[in-house]
């Protein structure tokens, strides 16, 4: 028992240590960061956070990132729901091949699609917009959401569909009012993974934006200059980047737990 507790405590400390060190650095000056090792800030400063919250070139990076992440999550889950239902409930020629092809898109590296997306969006006028990143991320998130939701939908008995039809429900009414609440856990899990992928993805977000829609992950690279690295500002930006993901995890934690028990998570 004591050995198990020691392993658990050690694991938690191991996970929290990088976050603690990031917060610790964000409250220090660059001089102290690059000086001798200190476990706590000797010269406590909030200048790094003030810089981010008062400089529009910094805080708009978070706004842009949240915008395209939310757009992508809504589009991905909305498109994946009927697709997953079709894969689960119907059998048609090439269904397994089509399902596998969707998953291969998810497994492909983002670098493969960076140049085609860049050319396409420049041609149609979507370059440097939040829609460009949101739609590009759909290529990876829609297959993931379909795969997750198909597992949850397959767990719902076919008899429920037949009973609703006998009771006179139209398919759209049944799908929205009855079926979607039944797979609410699956929708929460799919939305979580879509959110997290889009939030942490960097290559496409940098390639498809320039000025007007640049996300915080791309803006953070500006801390490198001829004078050196602005470690404190970079650490503060990193701390604030963790916050949205932590908030999402808090609200969907129950869905994720049920997803591990019931679905394809």
Image (tube, rainbow, N blue to C red):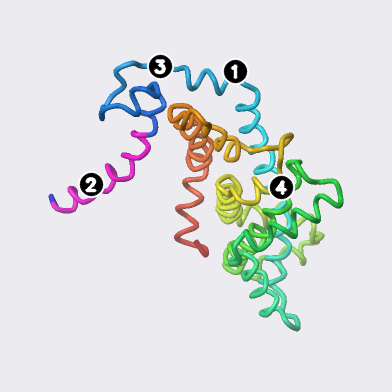
Q: Which residue is mark 3?
A: 45
> CA gap, disc 2 to disc 4?
41 Å
Relative image position of residue 75 (x, y in whole percent): 72, 51
**Whether residue 248 is situated above or below residue 185 in the rendered picture:** above
Highlighted magenta segment, given as a residue range: 3-21
Q: Which residue is mark 4?
A: 208
Magenta stretch, overall SS = helix
Q: Are marks 3 and 4 in contact (CB under 8 Å)?
A: no
Q: Nearer the viewer, residue 67 or 159?
A: 67
Secondary structure type for disc 4: loop
Indicate which disc, 1 or 4, sits on the residue closer to the N terminus.
1
Q: Is residue 108 magenta?
A: no
How many residues crowd mark 3 within 10 Å: few (<14), some (14–19), many (20+)?
Answer: some
Indicate which disc, 2 or 4, sits on the residue closer to the N terminus.
2
Q: Are marks 1 and 2 in contact (CB under 8 Å)?
A: no
> CA gap, disc 1 to disc 4?
26 Å
Q: Nearer the viewer, residue 117 or 161?
A: 117
- The label shown at residue 10 is 2
Indicate which disc, 3 or 2, sits on the residue closer to the N terminus.
2
Residue at (57% x, 40% y) in the render: 217
Q: Is residue 9 magenta?
A: yes
Indicate which disc, 1 or 2, sits on the residue closer to the N terminus.
2
Report the residue that reaches farthest toward the left.
2
Viewer-side label of 1, 2: 1
Q: Are marks 1 and 4 in contact (CB under 8 Å)?
A: no
> CA gap, disc 1 to disc 3?
15 Å
Q: Are marks 3 and 2 in contact (CB under 8 Å)?
A: no
């Amino acid at each position: 028992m004591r050995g198990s507790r020691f392993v658990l405590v050690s694991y938690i400390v191991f996970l929290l240590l990088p976050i603690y060190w990031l917060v610790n650095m964000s409250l220090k000056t660059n001089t102290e960061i690059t000086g001798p090792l200190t476990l706590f800030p000797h010269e406590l400063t909030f200048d790094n956070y003030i810089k981010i919250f008062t400089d529009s070139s910094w805080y708009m990076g978070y706004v842009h990132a949240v915008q395209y992440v939310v757009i992508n999550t809504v589009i991905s889950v909305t498109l994946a729901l009927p697709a997953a239902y079709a894969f689960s409930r119907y059998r048609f020629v090439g269904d397994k091949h089509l399902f596998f092809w969707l998953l291969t898109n998810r497994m492909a590296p983002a670098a493969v699609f960076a140049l085609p997306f860049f050319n396409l969006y420049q041609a149609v006028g979507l370059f440097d917009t939040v829609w460009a990143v949101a739609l590009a991320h759909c290529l990876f998130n829609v297959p993931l959401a379909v795969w997750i939701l198909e597992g949850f939908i397959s767990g719902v008995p076919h008899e429920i569909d037949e009973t609703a039809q006998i009771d006179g429900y139209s398919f759209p009414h049944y799908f929205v009012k009855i079926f979607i609440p039944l797979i609410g856990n699956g929708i929460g899990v799919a939305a979580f993974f879509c959110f997290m992928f889009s939030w942490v993805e960097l290559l496409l977000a940098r390639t498809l934006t320039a000025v007007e829609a640049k996300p915080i992950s791309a803006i953070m690279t500006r801390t490198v200059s001829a004078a050196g690295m602005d470690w404190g500002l970079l650490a503060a930006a990193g701390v604030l980047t963790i916050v949205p993901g932590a908030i999402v995890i808090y609200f969907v934690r129950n869905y994720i737990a049920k997803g591990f028990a019931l679905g394809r998570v």
